[in-house]
Image (spheres, rainbow, N blue to C red):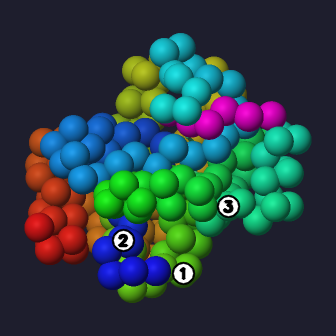
């Protein structure tokens, strides 16, 4: 891996606001590029294949596992696979850009272990479990069952925060974006 092949990992429990922070960073810095994960869940309204995720069947995903096409993959929710494709990171590096991975905490730990010197991992913490539940509810995209699964998982995931290079409490989105920006520009020497 050459000197410039760095990785930014943004991780958090679902609903902590990592997607908003990721969008802010990607809009502001054209040399950052979103790493489009492979996923086997159904696209939500407005999501585009190849832009939000590479949506695929479980069979196609499992073939890629066998072919060792992933840097990391997880069954993030019951029956739903998500994974970071090696080809995606290569594509972004070839463009001279730095990939930004918006992935769950287990995936984040794995990527960090693979690239200990070339990755920066930032954990976004929700201000409280109540707030996290409110955010997930207001998103309106989750069924009661999926909401309960995400809330359960979140309380476990919060216990992982100390595994990461940096941690940000997202009680004020603007402030959290500015903190993440500072950490990333420092890491990349910008
Ligand atoms: P959602 O279904 O809300 O898009 O994503 C669910 C969770 O999966 C989020 O925490 C998201 O960050 C995570 N995720 C998305 N892509 C990947 C991936 O490639 N690998 C892993 N481990 N998690 C991912």
Q: Disc count in the image? A: 3
Which mark is first along the chain, 2 or 1? Answer: 2
Contact check, label 2 and label 3, Cβ < 8 Å: no
Look at 73% across and 46% down and name the residue there. 81
Which residue is the extreme one toward the top? 45
Look at 60% across and 61% down and name the residue there. 86
Tell me where residue 113 sits by quadrant.
bottom right
Tell which of 47 and 105 is nearer to you. 47
**Residue of label 3:** 70
Disc 1, SS: helix
In-image side of 130 versus 36 (left or right): left
Magenta region, residue range:
52-57
In-image side of 121 versus 56 (left or right): left
Which mark is first along the chain, 3 or 2? Answer: 2
Look at 40% across and 21% down and name the residue there. 138
Front tag of 1 and 2: 2
Which residue is the extreme one toward the bottom? 117
**Residue of label 2:** 6
Q: Magenta span has 129? A: no
Q: Is mark 3 within 8 Å of ligand 1?
A: no
**Residue of label 1:** 113
Front tag of 1 and 3: 3
Give residue 65's position: percent from left, percent from top: 80, 58
Q: Is mark 2 within 8 Å of ligand 1?
A: no
Tell me where residue 11 sits by quadrant.
bottom left
Q: Is residue 17 visible?
A: no
Contact check, label 1 and label 3, Cβ < 8 Å: no
Q: Magenta span has 55? A: yes
């Amino acid at each position: 891996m050459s000197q410039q092949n760095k990785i930014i990992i943004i991780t958090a429990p679902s609903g902590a606001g990592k997607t908003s922070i990721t969008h802010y960073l990607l809009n502001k810095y054209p040399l950052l590029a979103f790493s489009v994960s492979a996923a086997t869940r159904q696209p939500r309204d407005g999501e585009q294949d190849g832009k939000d995720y590479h949506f695929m069947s479980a069979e196609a995903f499992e073939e890629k596992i066998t072919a060792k096409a992933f840097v990391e993959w997880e069954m993030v929710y019951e029956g739903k696979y998500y994974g970071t494709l090696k080809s995606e990171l290569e594509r972004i590096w070839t463009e001279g850009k730095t990939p930004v991975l918006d992935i769950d905490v287990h995936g984040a730990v794995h990527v960090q272990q693979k690239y200990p010197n070339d990755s920066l991992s930032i954990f976004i913490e929700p201000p409280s479990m109540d707030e996290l539940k409110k955010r997930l509810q207001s998103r309106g995209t989750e069924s009661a069952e999926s909401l309960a699964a995400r809330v359960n998982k979140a309380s476990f995931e919060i216990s992982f925060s100390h595994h990461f290079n940096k941690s940000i409490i997202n009680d004020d989105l603007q402030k959290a974006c500015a903190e993440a920006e500072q950490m990333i520009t420092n890491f990349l020497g910008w």
